[in-house]
Image (spheres, helix red, strand yellow):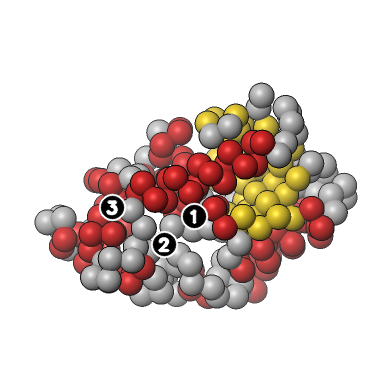
Amino acid sequence: MSINLYIVRHGETYINKYKRIQGWTNAPLTKKGIQDGKSAGKRLQNIKFNNAYSSDLERSTTTAEIVLNQNKHTDSELLQPLPELREQFFGYFDGIPNSIAAQAIAKKRSLPENSTFANLTSELGPFEIINAIHEADPTGDAETADLFWQRLMTGFRKISKENNDNDNVLLVSHGRLLSTLGQHFAQLDGDQAEPDNGAVSIWHLDDDQLELHVFNDLKTIW
């Protein structure tokens, strides 16, 4: 059984705009972020979705509602928020500038302190970068790779069980989460695996296995 899973990254938030880490911290969409959602919705307006899901974080639910409100065939009341598919939890680093967090993580792993998150992801890989963030977190609150992956796969198994073969399903989720999926299932390069805000990617989902067909698309009208 294979489900057609249309995954949209949420619209830009103010934390995204200010180039800060955003995990579980909420922030409203910017004007551009609202337009990100409208643009994705317009490009997906002709797809009849059998079900629709989002992370339970505000930026994802808001984007999902914007997308569904433009859809010609799908009622926005179908939307189900799933806490299992919220963004990675960065603990102490949530909300601080990307560059400062990257420096702290690089220092902990004895890597060049001018490393960016893209550098670190390429160097360490999709799961070890998560563990490195956890290790560098002085509070110990940041998720480990095992915890993150277990809850993520629980969410995808739930979607798989609730849908039928060849169903079209919408999911609005997050950048680092989608980057991890892309690196693990599609061997995307770590510095190119995080999609743009409002971008559409198409995956085929079977239980907790995913196959990538379209990545980071900002132009196609389906």
The reply to whether residue 156 is in sight is: yes
| x 72%, y 27%: residue | 165
The circle on residue 89 is 2
Q: Residue 112, how many percent across, how many down?
A: 15, 58
Q: Residue 18, how many percent across, how many down?
A: 45, 75
Amino acid at circle 2: Phe
Which of pointers 2 and 1 lies earlier in the amino acid sequence? 2
Query: In this image, 34 relative to 184: left or right?
Result: right
| x 79%, y 53%: residue | 78
Q: Residue 101, how many percent across, how many down?
A: 29, 68
| x 58%, y 38%: residue | 157
Marks 2 and 1: CB-CB under 8 Å? no
Which of pointers 2 and 3 lies earlier in the amino acid sequence? 2
Local packing at callout 2 (Cα closer than 10 Å; few below 14, some 14-19, many 20+) is many
Amino acid at circle 1: Gly
The circle on residue 175 is 1
Read off the residue under disc 3.
131
Q: Quadrant of residue 65?
A: bottom right
Instruction: Name the quadrant of the C terminus.
Output: top right
Query: In this image, 74 relative to 111: left or right?
Result: right
